[in-house]
Image (tube, rainbow, N blue to C red):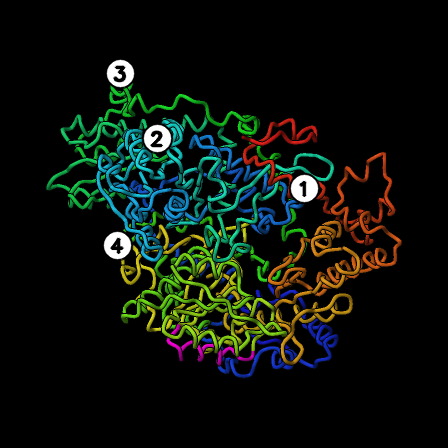
Amino acid sequence: MTGQPRLDELTQEDAFLARHLGPSAAEVAGMLSVLGLASLDELIDQAVPESIRLRQPLALPGPRREDRALADLAARARHNRVQRSLIGMGYHGTVMPSVIRRNVLENPGWYTAYTPYQPEIAQGRLEALLNYQQLVVDLTGLDIANASLLDEATAAAEAMAMARRLSKSDSRRFFVDEYSFPQTRAVLETRARYLGFELVSGPLATAAQSNCFGALLQYPDDRGLVADLGPAIAGLKASGAIVAVACDPMALVLLKSPGALGADIALGSVQRFGLPMGYGGPHAAFFATREDCVRSMPGRIIGVARDARGRTALRMTLQTREQHIRREKANSNICTSQVLLANLAGFYATYHGPEGLRTIARRIHRLAALFAAGLRAAGIAVRHRHFFDSVRFDAGERTPALHDILTGAGYNLRRLDDGGLAAAFDETVTPEALAQLLSLITGREADLERLDAEVIATGENLPPALLRQDAILSHPVFHRHRTEHGMLRYLKALQNRDLALDHAMIPLGSCTMKLNPASAMIPVGWPEFADLHPFAPADQAAGYRQLLDDLTAWLTAITGFDAISLQPNSGAQGEYAGLVGIRRYHDSRGEVQRDICLIPQSAHGTNPASAHLCGLEVVVVACDAQGNVDIADLERKAAEHTGRLAALMITYPSTHGVFEEAIRDICAIVHRHGGQVYLDGANLNALVGLARPADMGADVCHMNLHKTFAIPHGGGGPGMGPIGLAAHLAPFMPGHPAPGPEQCGQGAVNAAPHGSASILPITWMYLAMLGGTGLVQASRIAILNANYLATRLGEHYPVLYSGRRGRVAHECILDIRPIRAATGIAEIDIAKRLMDYGFHAPTVSFPVPGTIMIEPTESETRAELDRFVEAMAGIRAEIRKVESGLWPADDNPLKRAPHTQADVVADDWKRPYSRAEAVFPLPWLRANKFWPSVNRIDEVWGDRHLQCSCPPTASYDTGAAPPGPAA
């Protein structure tokens, strides 16, 4: 029969590509017509320089249908063996309440939202983060907390740097508790080296005599011991040191807080508040300090402010602290935090409340106490009288055989270097499991009833003097949502206040808010990936090994580098890891004097911040009138610093949204003067399959998996930032103290060997479903969509930069400065007005002040792009009414934006435009209106009246103005 399709056409292995790409083939042709082009090839020839083009097919497998990819990944997952993990070391089994899993973790309304830089359409996430901060403040006993950091180990490194900023001591020594977690010590060693700090370690009793500027203590410590840190803290502070305490938040439910013990800083991981171990992450680190230290604290802080109507509203406070603004003067280079994970942990506390948390904590401790009592009854020595969840015991010569027996029975215990064993209990352990564990160890049947009566009679194993006496979680939010129905409605109410990708395009330049495929998200919840301890025996993680090997091979093919490290768990951490690798490389060659980092004016703010953290001196390279690196200035500065040149950091395609023609020449200049080239991979999504960073001359590059490869933003995190390295830098990639093949090079940059491993299946699925051919087409459509928007929006706003042949890359910058000069309407006014049109604002005033940067990605349809153009054209028409004098410069829809339902129902509407013009400026908004929940927020008021904990509930319920400052 003629005209029938072939079997391979009916099989549709490439079906996902059409689901992922926004424009259809017919729409692509129409969009190309608008550009005056006949084909996508013609567009790519105009946009991407010939000199860097990849001329062979991308060496990846072919595409797979969604069901086929899921089946293939499931086959790998089955090679992981999930056992009951009692290893501890900061990672514990947990139970995420189903109402939270279903309605937050698996809900695109939560995981596809962007960082809340536009707070008027992010009030739900901001309230959830404020609840999280209140949780941390209550548990730590300190004044103020941030909205999360990356993990416990890097939070400890941030505390070390913060202590140096705060301490009046001249010392460069930092004391580290000898019983802190080994992965924390490893990260501290990496960070200290290029900050010029000396780490000293020893017993707590010697801490005050160590002549240090700061100290990190562990509570409970790595042995499981609960000790009174008060005397050591007092001695350290008397010597002028700033004291940080790394602590277990579940233990703090029962134990005296670090603040009550005198600590200046408290930090740790909220992983055990319902977050799966995930082979190491992602997890949210908490960080709290005294209020007078707030401007030195790293990370983002959510604060209480007020809107134009005087109502309580929330925002990220003190944003001028952020590294994008402060650059090399920043406190930290952190860009991605762990918002989704912080929210999950905060909701866990909200759902359980103080009584529920206390019950869980007491159950964990009781299980540990029963275990210790059962061991003692069998004549087995338990090392510590006071512990929370971790019990160390001596099995003597039986240790190796006993460890094997327990592992074979499904229990992973920690084997100690000195011949002992340790078991760390968590909320997933059942009485039946405890009884079996005791029977395996002691060889006798465990009588839990008798042991329980004994423990109750003799007292539990927490020091009475260290028991918590103060109340926690007294705010009403932690008492109002006990039922599943109530919690469901609370989560939905918060979600309704946030604009995410499930409502409309989020056209943020440089942030790549693309589709996060549902099929790619499914494996995140599989127990084989979610419930594995990061230090589980290698033979229990064979499926992860296959996944990691696949990703390493695929990312190698995409970037052209010789080696890949998957350890960095954010883009900024990838920058840091790459720069440390460069420094280690120079040091290995005896060129320790190389400490200059050249950075173009257009660079991401994290670039100079990361260079600063690596002990590098930043020298800025000018850009020319077209936004490209000024080659003459680069030549001049590279020659001037030739003996000290360590690296150039460059973003490609550039942050100005174009493919620079001279990228190979730029790399050659740096190499000629002895430096290395760090290519910031923030815009890698415009390169995949079209060009490779290594082929251009780059020596190292990070890859934002949360941007280019579909891991969702989660409202500001999680992220992943693996690095690719040339062969000569490969020996200096991150290592890790955990057993395994990663023990090489520079030491750890992350608490877990493979960073946030449990979200790597998302990228695996994305790459598997698209395959090599699909990835190339995705890059081509991303460039098409950007050029289509640039052409159509160029009719209303000037496009600031374009390439030599008049094309942009994957994003474009609109210049609002002429409009502001003529009318007083600024880029921020356009951003706020876009909310009334149902869109999230593009990137504002970055990388050029007075501009907006737009990136549509490949996954938006032509209809959505046209809708955005119509909105931007409508706003330009409104600006013309201001220009003509029809609307006053200070009283028009742009200056008043965004508009809320409160505006529409107000009795006193006295504005020169109608209510309909305010909230329904285009007809299609009536069918699907997103209502901002607050009016424009008074940013200045929020910074002047700093309050970063939950306000009284009445201020939410009645719309009253928020209370005064916390201090």
Residue 400 in which image quadrant: top left
Residue furthest toward the left? 397
Q: Is residue 734 left or right of residue 906?
A: left
Q: What is the CA distance from the residue labelled 1 to the residue labelled 4?
A: 52 Å
The three-letter amino acid code for the residue at tag 3 is Ala
Mark 1 or 4, closer to the camera:
1
Residue pointed to by mark 2: 364
Picture coordinates of residue 154 (x, y %)? 39, 49
- Numbered disc 2: secondary structure: helix
Q: In the image, which residues are magenta?
A: 661-675
- Numbered disc 4: secondary structure: loop
Residue 593 in which image quadrant: bottom left
State the residue in front, 423 or 342: 342
Residue pointed to by mark 4: 739
630 relative to 284, above or below: below
- Numbered disc 1: secondary structure: loop
Residue 388 is covered by the magenta coloring:
no
Residue pointed to by mark 3: 457
Of mark 4 and mark 2, the one earlier in the sequence is 2
Q: Quadrant of the N terminus?
A: bottom right
Q: Dominant secondary structure of the magenta stretch?
A: helix
Mark 2 or 1, closer to the camera:
1
Picture coordinates of residue 275 (x, y %)? 44, 42
156 relative to 783, above or below: above
Residue pointed to by mark 1: 938
Q: What is the CA distance from the residue labelled 1 to the residue labelled 3?
A: 58 Å
Q: What is the CA distance from the residue labelled 3 to the residue labelled 4?
A: 42 Å
